[in-house]
Amino acid sequence: MAQPMTLELVEAPDGVAGLEEGSTRSSFLKLGGVVLTGTFLAGLAAEDAEAQGGPSRAGDLRILGAALLLEQLGAAFYAQALRRAGLRGETRRYAQTLLRDERAHVRAVSAQIRRLGGRPARAPRFNFRGTTSSRDRFLRTSVVLESTDVAALNGAGPLVTKSTLAAAGALVSVEARHAAWGLDILGRTPAPRAFDPGLSLGQVIARVRRTRFVPGL
């Protein structure tokens, strides 16, 4: 089972592994297909017939579906934290800024899905399991979520068409700034390593699943 991403792993020089040997385009397509159909587990079991081909519109739609789930999760997380965590000062400005950005990302990813002829999935119900109940728990969880977004987008980059790659590139740099800002507020090194390798979809799924933020995943 993949190790859950913790703040310590985010900061470790080799904490975020690169694409695993044997990781394929199909693993990214599976999660996207799961999100778009709304049946989380069924899509993970089936191989995608298009997986052996190059980037395609259908593949983009599935990957964008996965990205949309992550952005929806982030938007819901920051909205709840602003209501419940008693945030003040810079931490409150941080949460407000990230909420604004994640909502903009939801709109941008949804628009790209529509441009490709797809239909964006509605956000599921999330259960953040007490991580929005205090400033420290909120910040530590936020950094992990933002770092996971960066790693997921880096991993997906080689698998998508040029138009979707351009859209993803506009998101990943902002997500990285989010993570750096959160680390700085926590008094940690904002740029803990020289490279940000990508996560395989299997790693992303395992880490999101182990949060138990998405019931049914």
Image (cartoon, grey):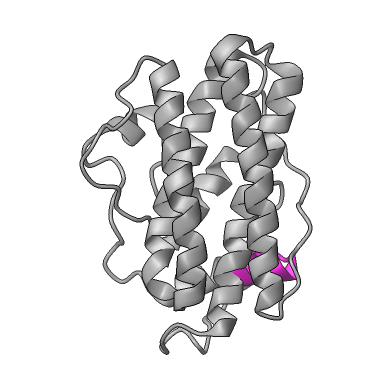
Q: Can residue 2 be seen in this view?
A: yes
The percent coordinates of residue 43 (x first, y second) are 62, 72
Per the rendered image, the range of residues in magenta is 32-42
Which quadrant does the C terminus fall into?
Answer: bottom right
Please, is residue 63 above or below residue 199 in the view?
below
Quarter of the image where one finds residue 63: bottom right
Q: Is residue 128 visible?
A: no
Q: Which residue is drawn at 46% across and 66% down?
A: 166
Q: In the visual, does 69 lie left or right of 199?
A: right
Quarter of the image where one finds residue 158: bottom left
Q: Which residue is drawn at 55% across and 75% down?
A: 60
- Residue 215 highlighted magenta (yes or no): no
Q: In the visual, does 58 lie left or right of 110?
A: left
Question: Which SS type dominates the magenta stretch?
Answer: helix
The percent coordinates of residue 176 (x first, y second) are 41, 41
The percent coordinates of residue 10 (x first, y second) are 35, 35
Q: Which residue is drawn at 73% across and 28% down?
A: 80
Q: Which of 193 and 164 is in front in this view?
A: 164
